[in-house]
Image: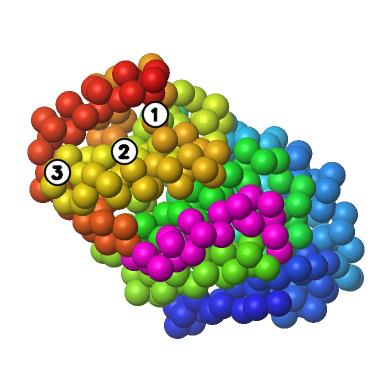
Amino acid sequence: MKTQDVELGERSYPIYAGKALLTDPSLYARHLSGRNVLVVTDSNVAPLYLQALIESLGNHNVSQVVLQAGEEFKTLDAVSTVYDELMAQKFDRSSTIIALGGGVTGDIAGFAAASFQRGIQFLQVPTTLLAQVDSSVGGKTGVNHPRGKNMIGAFHQPTAVIADIDTLQTLPAREYSAGLAEVTKYGLINQPAFFDWLSDNLESLLQLDPDTVAEAVLSCCRFKAEIVAADERESGQRALLNLGHTFGHAIENAVGYGVWLHGEAVAAGICLAARFSALSGFMPHAQVTTIEKLLHRANLPIHPPAEMTAAQFLELMSRDKKVRDQVLTLVLMRGIGKAFLTSSYDREALHQMLAEQPAKAAT
């Protein structure tokens, strides 16, 4: 087991990563201050890991909520289901919510924890690659609205993250590849050496070699922990973690939540950000090709849905959380490992690039 701390003063917490952690009672005992525990999971994960986790909680008073699996169910109704169980069991501020599952479960459980009685503890036990390297770390919680992704939420840091890489063995291949989009993102933001490592070791990652997977998970957690510690509430540089996400969220919204996996949409979004960066003269076109080749090798889409129009993209992107005074800030790149934020870009050129995408997607 390896440990990486997220340094946030009194809200600091550890990330544990390694094998056989989900069933380690000592990890839970360190971070549960009260007897009452609510485990929130989903219909895919519950049959695999729920009972094992409950047994690891010893003599705690444990309740459970099993949500419907899928991004399309990341709604306020799901959060209300968690509230209902907390109220039915008469849980109070000494209680803890444990999120067992992927990013959707973590977001729902975290938002319920942030808002129930104005905030209770929660602990992340991510079981997908995407959640282990990204969404379980940093305290972003929330749900989708029909008009925009993750528009309802709160910052609420977990008390710990327990990332058991053994759980990735049961992850569908498509979900695993979706997580690799977020892994790639870190190399593109500010870790060019990690991007090169990823390119060299991608086949081992796809084969779930445990040492390679562990190194990728720990590296991503370390990169994100550093960024979150410097900018917890995304007032500046933390927004770089949204590389590919402004385009990606528009894709998810347009096709319907759950049709494209989040990581798939992010992969296509990263390619759009790279193409626009090159079109704007910020990065060499050759590096766009390098990025596209790596994501294609990871079995990820490099073009958005052919049916999406430029007008649809721009309308959905106008609802992004990075819009300030009706101006959208984009995360672009000056090269691999050189992401930056800008609101100074050619709007007409952006429209033209997006208008050309359906033809590219069809080829």
> Quarter of the image containing the N terminus?
bottom right
Compared to 95, does 253 lie above or below? Answer: above
As drawn, the label of residue 213 is none
Tell me what residue is drawn at x 75 percent, y 73 percent.
28
Label pair 1/2, CB-CB below 8 angstroms = yes
Mark 2 and mark 3: span between their CA atoms?
12 Å
SS at mark 3 in the image: loop
Residue 164 visible in the snapshot: yes
Residue 182 x, y percent position in the rendering: 48, 52
Tell me what residue is drawn at x 67 percent, y 64 percent.
163
- Three-letter amino acid code of the residue under disc 3: Ser
SS at mark 1 in the image: loop
Magenta span: predominant SS is helix
Residue 192 within the segment the image draws in magenta = yes
The residue indicated by pointer 1 is 304
Q: Earlier in the sequence, mark 1 or mark 2?
A: 2
Q: Quadrant of residue 339?
A: bottom left
Compared to 352, does 332 lie above or below? Answer: below
Compared to 31, does 337 lie above or below? Answer: above
> Quarter of the image containing the C terminus?
top left
Residue 52 x, y percent position in the rendering: 87, 59
Mark 1 and mark 2: span between their CA atoms?
8 Å
Extreme-bottom residue of the structure: 9
- Three-letter amino acid code of the residue under disc 1: Pro
Q: Residues within 10 Å of mark 3 (few under 14, many from 20)?
A: some
**Numbered label tally:** 3
Indicate left or right for 192 with 88 as reference: left
As drawn, the label of residue 272 is 2
The residue indicated by pointer 3 is 280
- Stretch in magenta: 190-210
Q: Earlier in the sequence, mark 2 or mark 3?
A: 2
Residue 214 x, y percent position in the rendering: 64, 67
